[in-house]
Image (spheres, helix red, strand yellow):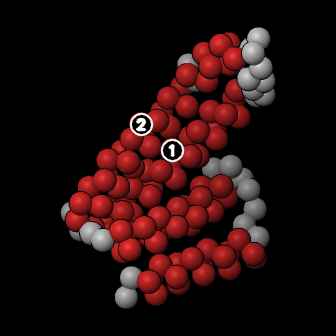
Amino acid sequence: MSSFLLVLFSVFMAATGQVVLKLGASRLGSLFLSRQEIFHDIIRVVTTPQILLSFLFYAAGFFTWVKALTKEDLSYVYPMASLSYVFMLLYSHFLLKEPITAGKFIGVLLIIAGVVFINR
């Protein structure tokens, strides 16, 4: 697999993990994390299916990222991590029904242009 595809997959997995984590956090409601509630809150967090699933996505992204780092220079790979903003914009719009504002759209275009520019 090419380095670019490894990085793209890693970023996609991390972004997917973040969205799934958001869905799990939304199911939790509020967390108090006070001394009296900390144990109860921790149990609630680690038994929420979406939160557990997010760890699997993060793990897939992590191991793919490590593989990419073994193949390429950090200065090539790391700027591509900003592509997570592109995935986030799409996920947020289509799954979480958040609006795509002009500022967000222009920002994502600038990020894509920056990644292309840095990797030439």
Q: Position of residue 106 (x, y in %)?
A: 68, 79
Q: Position of residue 98 (x, y in %)?
A: 74, 56
Camera-nearest residue between 25 and 100: 25
Determine whether the residue tagged by mark 2 lies in a helix, strand or loop. helix
Does residue 34 lie above or below 98 as drawn?
Answer: above
The residue labelled by disc 2 is: 56
Camera-nearest residue between 19 and 71: 71
Dividing the picture into quadrants, the one containing residue 21 is: top right
The reply to whether residue 55 is in sight is: yes
Callout 2 amino acid: Leu
Dividing the picture into quadrants, the one containing residue 49 is: top right
Does residue 94 lie above or below 51 as drawn?
Answer: below
Name the residue rendered at 58%, 64% in the picture. 85
User: Of marks 2 and 1, which one's residue comes earlier in the chain?
Assistant: 1
Determine whether the residue tagged by mark 1 lies in a helix, strand or loop. helix
Q: Residues within 10 Å of mark 2 (few under 14, many from 20)?
A: some
Callout 1 amino acid: Gly
Left or right, residue 90 beside residue 9: right
Q: Position of residue 94 (x, y in %)?
A: 63, 56
Q: Are marks 2 and 1 in contact (CB under 8 Å)?
A: yes
The reply to whether residue 90 is in sight is: no
Does residue 93 lie above or below 96 as drawn?
Answer: below
Quadrant into which the N terminus falls: bottom left
Kindly identify which numbered label has been placed on residue 17.
Answer: 1
Q: CA distance from mark 2 to mark 1?
A: 8 Å
Name the residue rendered at 26%, 55% in the picture. 67
Dividing the picture into quadrants, the one containing residue 73 is: bottom left
Name the residue rendered at 72%, 67% in the picture. 100
